[in-house]
Image (spheres, helix red, strand yellow):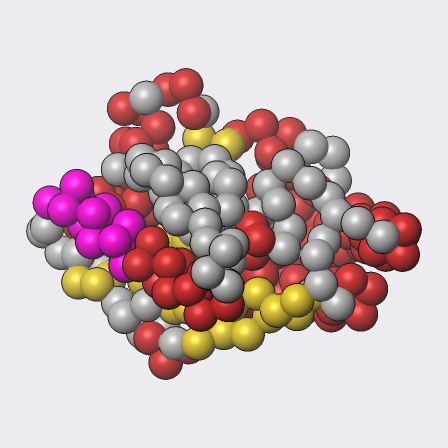
Amino acid sequence: MGPLRLVRSLLYTTWLFLGTGAYAVVVLLLFWAPTRWQFAVADHWARSQLRMLDLLCGLSYTVEGRENIPPGAHVSMWRHSSAWETIAQAAIFPPQAWVLKRELTWIPLVGWAIHLLKPIAINRKAGPAAVNQVVEQGTQRLAAGYWVLIFPEGTRVGHGESRKYGVSGALLASKAGCKIVPVAHNAGKFWPRRGWVKQPGRIRVAIGPPIDAAGRNPRELNEEVRTWIETKLQSMEESTRTPDDAIPIRK
């Protein structure tokens, strides 16, 4: 890691915190406005962050499969390996209610702003009660026209690693009768989950074909989503690596 990359990453991190705080204030000032206004601010925030990330750190992204985003409101299930996707999702997908740990909404300014964006804030230690909350509130968000974003691993996993999927997203889609759209990306390769130094390059995002979930077994749905995401990740890795630097998916 060269000193210039370190400085650029530090500059971007500063922008991330200051810019996020500023946009949070704007969202809070719009507490009286229709929710679509607040989502428009979140979209602008995400795009500004991604532009600055490219400018300062040389880290851009491409998206394939945008045509797989169906009309209406559905469940998106994203690979979770970096902080990057928590930003990018707001610029790539229609307005989404995020399933997240409730402690995030307690953060001054930023957490308060997140609260206005209709998240499903769960207590991770609540077990079945948290799953029921996702299903109940997720059904309400879908009925109101918002997508529901699920990180099925429940936490960030390292590049090349895999983790068991939680059942709440698949159960919600099954009961609500909507579709699941799987999203794979290799952001963790450039912005590691336990690192703030960003590697230059181009993140690949792949949006998979929507999966009809109505009435289906949630565990079977999870396996279908997991298989698609991990197969796609493996093909991304194989298309860019040399024979000596292969990183297999570890289960």
Taking the image as shown, residue 67 lies to the left or right of residue 117, namely left
Q: Main secondary structure of the magenta part?
A: helix
Q: Residue at x 90, y 51 (%)?
A: 3
Residue 85 at least partly seen: no
Taking the image as shown, residue 245 lies to the left or right of residue 151, namely right
Work out which residue is located at the far bottom of the displayed protein and give it. 67
- Residue interval drawn in magenta: 217-229
Is residue 222 on the magenta stretch?
yes
* Nearer-the-camera pick, 147 or 29: 147
* Nearer-the-camera pick, 208 or 249: 249
Taking the image as shown, residue 2 lies to the left or right of residue 104, namely right
Work out which residue is located at the far top of the displayed protein and give it. 125
Residue 57 at least partly seen: yes
Q: Could you tell me which quadrant the C terminus lies in?
A: top left
From the viewer's perspective, is residue 102 above or below residue 235? above
From the viewer's perspective, is residue 160 above or below residue 201? above
Q: Residue at x 37, y 65 (%)?
A: 235
Residue 121 on image: x %, y %: 48, 35
* Nearer-the-camera pick, 163 or 147: 163
Is residue 220 on the magenta stretch?
yes
Residue 51 on image: x %, y %: 73, 70
Q: Residue at x 62, y 45 (%)?
A: 192
* Nearer-the-camera pick, 204 or 88: 204
Q: Quadrant for residue 152, please give it.
A: top left
Residue 207 on image: x %, y %: 39, 68
Residue 5 on image: x %, y %: 83, 55
From the viewer's perspective, is residue 67 above or below residue 48? below
Q: Quadrant for residue 146, please give it.
A: bottom left
Taking the image as shown, residue 60 lies to the left or right of residue 21, namely left
